[in-house]
Amino acid sequence: MDEFDIETVAEPAIHAPILIEGLPGVGHVGKLAAEHLLEEFETTLISRLYSDHFPPQVTIDDGTTQLACLEFHKVDLSAPATSSTESAQETDTSPHDLVVLTGDHQAQDPSGHYQLTDTILDVVEGYGVERAFTLGGVPTGELIEEYSVIGAASSPEHVEELSDVIEFRDNEPAGGIVGVSGLLLGLGGRRGLDAACLMGETSGYLVDPKSARAVLEALEEILGFEVGYDSLEDRAEEMEEVVTKIREMEQGTAPTEDDLRYIG
């Protein structure tokens, strides 16, 4: 296999596409948000990106293996998925299709991150993408109740455009944005791509559906579409039970054997 290998799966017409990236990261916020878009709207798998910079493994679904890869999906914002709940109402307000990038892995080495991001940019430029939003989480180090969305962008003009929807804070996140989510802004900006990162605050300890919802609500306002949240709410309720157990332990409440089994 080549260092990077692109498998074309379909070649649908894509109208004024915007890239949405949601790969694994803090709280799995970006991954949850991107996968929720795939659940709620009509999608078409466009291509897969394979690389020897990914972990040497396959995933298994019903006994069938799939080599580690990233996937590019076309998302039609005017067409909710047939399985969606009534809360995902049909809308034709967005003039754009989305190209949603998902996957279970990022590169395992710094050089691989750069080369992977350059390859992603090559792929989406071929689809006509001129604007991108990367989605992720920013850790607070503590359990939180109110979820803010903070941002970073590839140009001052982009910051000004988005400042009514998301917060831009000086030198935050303090460590910068690591991985594909950050490099799509840095490398994409050098190519003239208008790119921004939307980061939901999250404890950093747990998978965080509430933070993913906050990020998606910001994206809704920016791009002018509507999406239902029933499935994310179900996951949030499950995680809230885990959070409750954690808070009880922090406060010195002795957990029962069942509690420990649930958390473990």
Image (tube, helix red, strand yellow):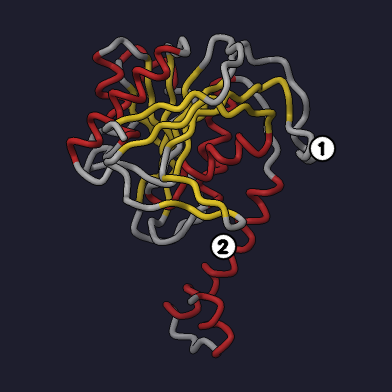
Q: Please, which residue is most extreme toward the front here? A: 1
Q: Determine whether 85 is above or below 184 in the image.
A: below
Badge 2 marks a residue whose secondary structure is: helix
Residue nearest the observer in this picture, 15 or 221: 15
Q: Can you give x and y, in whole percent of width and height, for residue 231 in the image? A: 68, 49
The mark nearer the N terminus, 2 or 1, is 1
User: Horizontally, is 98 left or right of 126 in the view?
Assistant: right
Q: Quadrant of the N terminus?
A: top left
Residue nearest the observer in this picture, 158 or 105: 105
Q: Residues within 10 Å of mark 2 (few under 14, many from 20)?
A: some
Q: Residues within 10 Å of mark 1 (few under 14, many from 20)?
A: few
What residue do we see at 61% from left, 15% from top? 12
What residue do we see at 24% from left, 29% from top? 115
User: Horizontally, is 146 left or right of 40 in the view?
Assistant: left
Residue nearest the observer in this picture, 136 or 107: 107
Residue nearest the observer in this picture, 20 or 63: 63
Disc on res. 86: 1
Q: Which residue is mark 2?
A: 239
Q: Quote the CA–CA distance across marks 2 and 1.
A: 24 Å
Q: Can you give x and y, in whole percent of width and height, for residue 8 in the image? A: 49, 23
Three-letter code for the amino acid on which mark 1 is drawn: Glu
Q: Please, which residue is most extreme toward the left here? A: 111
Badge 1 marks a residue whose secondary structure is: loop
Q: Please, which residue is most extreme toward the right here? A: 86
Total labels drawn: 2
